[in-house]
Image (tube, rainbow, N blue to C red):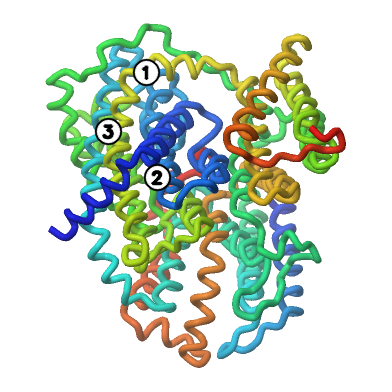
Amino acid sequence: MDILSQLLMGLSVALEPVNLFYCLMGCLIGTLVGVLPGIGPTAAMSLLLPATFHSTPVSAIIMLAGIYYGAMYGGSTTSILVNIPGEAASVVTCLDGYQMARQGKAGRALGISAFGSFIAGTLGLIGLTLVAPPLVSLALKFGPPEYFSLMCLGMVTLTYLSSSSMVRALMMACFGAIVGVVGTDSISGATRFTFGLTELMDGVGLIPVVMGLFGISEILLNFEQKIDREIFKTRVKGLLPTVKDWIQAKGAIARGTVIGFFLGILPGGGTILASFVSYAVEKKFSKYPERFGTGVIEGVAAPESANNSAAQGAFIPLLTLGIPPNAIMAVLLGALIIHGVTPGPLLLKQHPEVFWGVIGSMYIGNLMLLILNLPLIGLWVQVLRVPYPILMPLIILFCMIGAYTVAHSVVDVIFMLIFGVVGYLMKKLQYDAPPMILAFVLGPMMEFSLKQSLMLSKGTFQIFFTRPISATCLILTLILLCLQILPWLRMKDLGIALDSEEKH
Amino acid sequence: MTYIIANLFWIAFSVAVAIESWRLKLGTFHKPGPGFFPFWTAVLLGLLSVISLIKSLKEKREPSPGIWARVNFLKLGLMLVVLFLYAILLNTIGFLPGTLFLLFFLFRATEPYNWKKVLFASLLTVAATYVVFVVLLECQLPKGFLEF
């Protein structure tokens, strides 16, 4: 009952006109970003982060969260109609979605995708509502060793699931951690790697790094190739799935929801992993696996449900432990810190309006997205027709403005461009960006936890193994590292990709 | 060869970071100094880079030759030069004139549209951006020496 009263409080916060507006903006922009290939939710969130400086923390996070789960809805539209995923979590939807469109069933595919996303998103939210508060009590038992170990586990899990080799992913994590410590050391006050630049005293900003790595680098990559978008010409009609569609898809939606929710919570997991795993599970347990890829409705319902459910589940470790499970949540963490709110076990106590307001807004946002995605399909199709050579300069301009307005400094713009080049080279040489971003955000926190732990233990590492939660996390970390030498156990063969901040 | 160069770069980078971290003082395990965390992270990066280098040499693995084949280095380089110049000169020139030149270049660079259409589109975009960011969102964008 206490949870219910808190949720009602959160809904009352979410229903304030200004928060409804921010929620709608987030959902609209998220859907737009999901529809358009070439810019993903991470880049969009980074771009719009400066625009939230005038708003309250709860309004800012409501909008940014709306962009995230809105993009999950929007990504399916372009996957089904154009066979190009709008964002990476919708890659799998192309397999059967586009085939359904070719068979004249585009409307039913879009419909089941939207309804499946709504059902999974809502159930995921209920899970978030029920799981998060008890987890906060557990999180209060976390001390510096537990935080350090859990962050190590998150980092290693993310690198284990990397599409490139684990060694290279760990290299990127190390690189990210090093970039993250640039600036003033919080304990000793010494400046590190600032090269005399006063602009670096506070470190390299999150926004220039993320916008550069994901926004500018994507532009540079697309600059060298022509993106041909042949939009399915037939008028999309009949958006409501038939009764037979519901009977066929109900199991896929249910399984996708559960798989997505738990994979979303997992450090290193995310929406892409959830969509791939749910598709693979659906195909494995289907009575007709050979028909997957030819236009079966379960092939659309499962991944779309999973990615939306994962999007909700990912908020759990962020809000309760203050640890982002993936790179997109890392950006949200940065946003919360910029607004003076530190997520973690004390968030519920110190800022219940933020905690429950965000959860309340997600219920409303899910409903908004169902309403936006179905009737406005025609509009999204028109958006897809905007030539990329026109979109690209606009995206660059927004990136430039976004980076400048962080601190009214051209140094941030220059850093964004530098990281744009870095991100471009990383993509070319197949180094994954997500581990880098996660380590960039977590690195300072890991350093702080490590130092505190060593001070507590008077310099020994025993403390990490004598405390049960910390020991469990470190043992799991070591197991994952050891599994690296057994490549046949790796999930690379399922074609799993990370929450690619390449398309986020 | 590409991966070998990349791995050598990472080895050099990790050595540089380790040296600088050493200079910052590592402290002790009981009382870690400011250089402690970056030093050991750099050591780990260096070790991983060596492993990756050995793997590259052993497997003779290279990125697909096509990754550089389609790149128009001149066009890409020119775009980067323009973007960096825009950033460096933004405060001097000001947002409005600087952005107008930038957009004109970008619209022409991506597709060879008619220059009149490009100029019109650039002016329209600059005006719309000004209204949205400066008037509505009250962002402070540089005025430059022309004071507008």
Sequence-wise, the earlier of marks 2 and 3 is 2
Q: Position of residue A423 (x, y in %)?
A: 64, 45
Q: Is residue A85 visible?
A: no
Residue behind mark 1: A377
Q: Which amino acid type is shown beneath numbered disc 3?
A: Leu
Q: What residue appears at the point 82 percent right and 35 percent down from the top-left corner?
A: B147
Query: Between marks 2 and 1, how big is the CA–CA gap?
Result: 24 Å
Q: Position of residue A79 (x, y in %)?
A: 41, 25
In depth, the one of A233 and A414 nearer the eye is A414
Query: Between marks 3 and 1, how big is the CA–CA gap?
Result: 16 Å
Q: Is residue A47 above or below residue A187?
A: above
Q: Are marks 3 and 1 on the same chain?
A: yes
For mark 2, name the chain: A
Q: Is residue A66 above or below residue B116?
A: below
Residue behind mark 2: A62
Which class describes the residues within 10 Å of circle 3: few (<14), some (14-19), or many (20+)? some
Q: What residue appears at the point 61 percent right and 70 percent down from the top-left corner?
A: B41
Q: Secondary structure at mark 2?
A: helix
Q: Which amino acid type is shown beneath numbered disc 2?
A: Ile
In depth, the one of A274 and A188 nearer the eye is A188
Residue behind mark 3: A367
Q: Which amino acid type is shown beneath numbered disc 1?
A: Ile
For mark 1, name the chain: A
Sequence-wise, the earlier of marks 3 and 1 is 3
